[in-house]
Amino acid sequence: MYMQMILYLSYFYKHHELSIRLGFWYSAQAVADVLAGLLAYGILHLRGYAGQAGWRWLFLIEGSLTLVLAILSFLFLPPSMTQTASWARGKKGWFTEREEVILVNRILREDPSKGSMGRNEPLTAKLVWQSLNDYDLWPLYMIGLIFLVPYTTISQYFTLLMTDFGFGEFNVILLAIPYSVLGIVTRIILTYAAEIFGSLAWMGAVAQAWTLPLFIYMNVVDFSQAKRWVAWAVLTMILSFPSPHALQAGWNSRNSNSVRSRALSAAMYNMCTQLSGIIASNVYQDWDAPRYVQGNRVLLALVCTNITVYAATKTYYILRNRHRDRKWAAMTEEQRVEYIASTMDTGNKRLDFRFAH
């Protein structure tokens, strides 16, 4: 669903619009986490009602809500800007013919590659291989592999840590709400800032810098002996960090410059972020409890590594763009016209394409 949503939204929005929309989309996940925790606490108290276990009621009720939303999405989300008419969305559709022309042209003028492949055109093994060999996207995959590890590790252990500090089960659920709400705000601000300042990589580095002093604190003091409200404040600030996940998904999309690469790069980036969850699950070890001295050192080292990787990625794309600038400047106007008309280069391999950074 993740890569499908990115590809789907890319048909409706320009590059800078896509990152912002994805920011709101990912923010919905934080809202869902808050609601899911509260719902789960209440639903599990239905254990024994009608002779059913609490977990059965949880699966039934939350699963039913998901099913209803899936059906509504199928009915109300149009296949494209030119296919909005249906019995559910209105027989006349959402746009006039002139509006559809404007909507399509504004997308294609910014990125002509979006018209280079049909929406239902299958991906062949050759196209998949070409996408996997697109080394210019590998820096973004590396970022996807490690940038969430410090956040995810703390997120996975938040409940356990708060319980160790003496908070009750329901109070722990309530204590998770502030970082979910703050995370929404910081994520949206970061996404807008990336477009305002025109720097995707530096915004990602800023997000890591947010957690740097907090992880330094956790390494300097005996965190297991900290006052519980101080511990909660530190963990809440870490988990409130402005996640660059949305802008990086959009970054992947705009640096792909083709429908084929965009679909595959979204999948690859998603697999890397999923793998980061496996890494995060193994940072804290039982033998290291309760201070997790070694684990916190690893997290601090990862934050510093992430900042370096963002800087290296920006440098790489700057150098790639300069290399193409030199080649493009060396060509005459006639050669440029000929290149655009006849080149076999596709996607982000075109000399007239520049990487976002």
Image: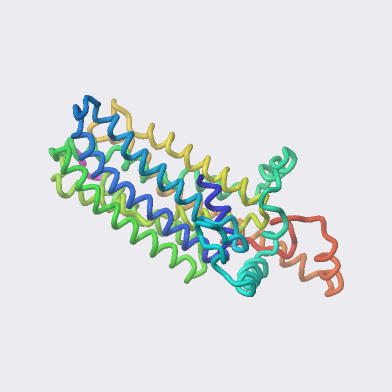
Residue at 70% x, 53% y is: 118
Q: Position of residue 305 (x, y in %)?
A: 45, 47
Quadrant occupied by the C terminus: bottom right
The stretch in magenta equals 219-224
- Residue 154 appearing in the image: yes
40 w.r.t. 100: above or below: above
Look at the image and say whether residue 221 sits in the magenta stretch. Answer: yes
Look at the image and say whether residue 41 sits in the magenta stretch. Answer: no
Quadrant of the image occupied by residue 101:
bottom right
Q: Seen in the image, is 273 located left or right of residue 259?
A: left
Count of marks overlaid on the render: 0
Q: Position of residue 123 (x, y in %)?
A: 70, 43
297 or 124: nearer the viewer: 124
Quadrant of the image occupied by residue 68:
top left
Name the colouring of the figure.
Answer: rainbow
284 w.r.t. 154: above or below: above
Q: Position of residue 249 (x, y in %)?
A: 52, 53
Q: Seen in the image, is 34 located left or right of residue 97?
A: left
270 or 49: nearer the viewer: 49
Q: Position of residue 290 (x, y in %)?
A: 22, 32
Q: Of helix, strand and loop, which mostly describes the magenta segment?
A: helix
- Residue 251 appearing in the image: no
Residue at 47% x, 51% y is: 73
245 w.r.t. 104: above or below: above
Quadrant of the image occupied by residue 166:
top left
Residue at 20% x, 40% y is: 42
246 or 280: nearer the viewer: 246
